[in-house]
Amino acid sequence: MQPDEDVRAVTLASAIDFEGFRRACRALWADQVGPDRVSWSTAQDPEADLFAAAANAAAASTAPPVSVPSGFMPLCESAILHRDPSRFALLYRLLWRLQIEPALRHDTLDPDWAAVHEMAQAVRADMHRMRTSVRFRAIEDGAAGGPLHVAWFEPEHHIVEATASFFAQRDAAMRWAILTPERSVRWDGARLLAGAPARRDQAPAADAGDEAWLGYCRSLFDPARGELSELPKRDGAAPCEMPSGSAAVRSTTRVRRGPNDPQGYRRPTQPQPGAGQPATPGGGAPATLPALREALERCRECPIGEHATQAVPGEGLRHARLMFVGEQPGDQEDLQGRPFVGPAGQLFNRALAQLGIERRDVYITNAVKHFKFELRGKRRIHKTPAQQEAAACLHWLESEIELADPGVLVALGATAARQLMGTAVAVTRQRGQWLKRADGRCVLIALHPSALLRMEPEDKEAAYDAWLRDLRKAADGASR
Ligand code: URA
């Protein structure tokens, strides 16, 4: 766009400056500057107009306040992380049109809506790839607090800072650094720091020694380079945007065991410049739910799979309003290859029927995909999966969530709650509460149906009623 008196130049502080973008939109709307009269850039763009106002305050104006449908802001928050430089113009155009064409909010086929949805989807997929494919390599650097864990990752979009808080929650108890050509991020046990971008041509070879990786890592976080900054940690403190009863949790670490793990866990792989580690044993992260189900059957990332009859994937609708997550398949589920078909499943089906929910309209899965049991005579007795077994299974669940893309999640019991939140959740105390995950998804905490089955007869009825209320709350939240 040519410099023109009629054109308002807006320069945002960075490619991910969502707050600046919001402020600019408000000011532009207040001044009634149409989308075709705005030129957008970021301070890092080579051609940025550094003298352009970053439209900080909305001018006093007679323009009506900006009004957008409820899902619009989260959509913008994701889409703004897309690499396409035209995203700011697109988002402002859509915002403008939403003000003057009220029916547009229902027109899902509109090309601007479709383009924004596509961008947000691509960003979420990239964040998911980062969450599931980063593999840390432990390096002894002599500092207090254990080894430094280093990983390499190449994002497609501007997602590094946004995804770093996921690791800061999940791996809070270890020191780590993720090197990326976008920006490098480091967790020192208390603070999330952003350092210089890593360069593939300067990074040590994948099989280079620890010293080389440590040296390179230090150079990226050298305060003398002046590129170090502390990032806000977007932890669970933000309330879940659900009707009521939100709460937040922090997480503890979850680290896979090393090569000599006596319990037979898969060896964590080395950081590979240029290549994210596959989430599936034989290839990249599955791209569809059927591909995930097929890959899951081959999974032997922890020892449970050796003894089970088969892996039990989730089942149900993509984009279902509700995704229920249980602990692990039981005896019947293991034999039939479907979740929640045994006694706990029957109770669960009864609750769904009472709530007027069709089982085929929801998505049902488990935190752990194989049945863990102990043989007593001929009986297979359920054994709770160890934390490490659950951790090894986490990427399957995360992939399922990403691909099924449900409205809200319901954690049935402590194993599911821990798996979904990355930290222990006191289920009996927190049941009925909404928690928010680092990826922004809302999780309702509920008892596991097996816990109800195990209760004393005199307690069962009241506990079942309370459980139904919790599940109804989830369904109501999902409808909104
Ligand atoms: N318990 C679970 O957690 N999941 C099932 O699929 C069955 C029983």
Image: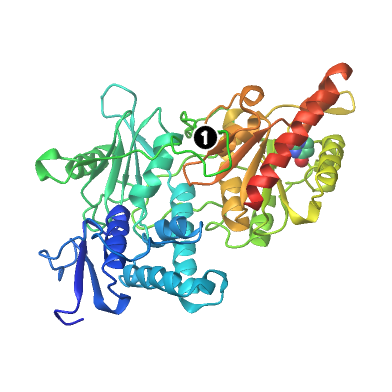
The residue at which mark 1 appears reads as 422
* Amino acid under disc 1: Gly
Question: Where residue 374 sits: x, y (%)?
Answer: 78, 26
Would residue 205 be found to the left or right of residue 296 on screen?
left
Ligand 1 position by quadrant? top right
Question: Where residue 65 sits: x, y (%)?
Answer: 38, 60
Query: Does residue 365 lie above or below 391 as drawn?
Result: below
Indicate if the residue with disc 1 has its beta carbon within 8 Å of ligand 1: no
Q: Residue at x 37, y 54 (%)?
A: 159
Viewer can see residue 375: no
Q: Residue at x 70, y 27 (%)?
A: 384
Would residue 264 be found to the left or right of residue 239 on screen?
right
Q: Residue at x 76, y 46 (%)?
A: 310
Picture quarter with the N terminus: bottom left
Question: Where residue 232 sits: x, y (%)?
Answer: 31, 39
**Scheme of image coloration:** rainbow
Question: Where residue 380 sits: x, y (%)?
Answer: 83, 29
Viewer can see residue 412: yes
* Identity of the residue furthest to the front in this view: 62
Instruction: Work out whether residue 447 or residue 315 is closer to the camera in this orientation and state it.
Output: 447
Would residue 107 be found to the left or right of residue 146 on screen?
right
Mark 1 Cα-neighbour bin, 10 Å: few <14, some 14–19, many ≥20 = many
